[in-house]
Image: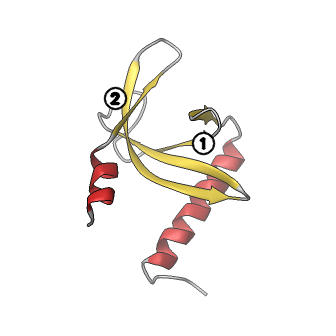
Amino acid sequence: MDDMEKDLDDELIELVDDDGKVINFKLLDVTEYKGVKYTLLLAAEPNEEIAEDEVVIFRLNEKEESLEPIEDEDLLQEIFDFYQQEADAEDGYEEN
């Protein structure tokens, strides 16, 4: 693992929920799907709302340097499925 990957692994992203509560996330990855970039995050500290292994996906707005929530459950599933296929292909597990 190079230093850049290590820095990403150690970096926490703080997001504030609707109640004003800060939730810390670890960056799992950034993926591009249909020309749009998305961040895949894991909860750094599991809580009652987000499980330890639950992936949370946000649209990455690079112009405003912000993360935008995605309400469309079907789109979220498509992005996650796409990410898994890409990750499997990188690991040499590509299915035909």
* 15 relative to 65 in the view: left or right: left
Q: Where is residue 82 in the image (x, y as percent from the top left)?
A: 61, 63
Question: Considering the numbered disc 1 on the image, is that residue within a helix, a strand or a loop?
Answer: strand
Residue placed furthest toward the bottom: 96
Callout 1 environment at 10 Å: few (<14), some (14 to 19), or many (20+)?
many
Q: Position of residue 69 (x, y in %)?
A: 62, 33
The residue indicated by pointer 1 is: 60
The residue indicated by pointer 2 is: 47
* 84 relative to 42 in the view: left or right: right
Q: Position of residue 87 (x, y in %)?
A: 48, 69
- Residue contact between numbered discs 2 and 1, judged by CB atoms under 8 Å: no
* 94 relative to 69 in the view: left or right: left
Residue type at the position of mark 2: Asn
Picture residue at 34% right of the left edge, 42% below the top: 52
Q: 72 or 10: nearer the eye?
A: 10
* Image: 29 above or below 84: above
* Image: 6 above or below 72: below
Question: Considering the numbered disc 2 on the image, is that residue within a helix, a strand or a loop?
Answer: loop
Per the model, the C-alpha gap separating discs 2 and 1 is 24 Å
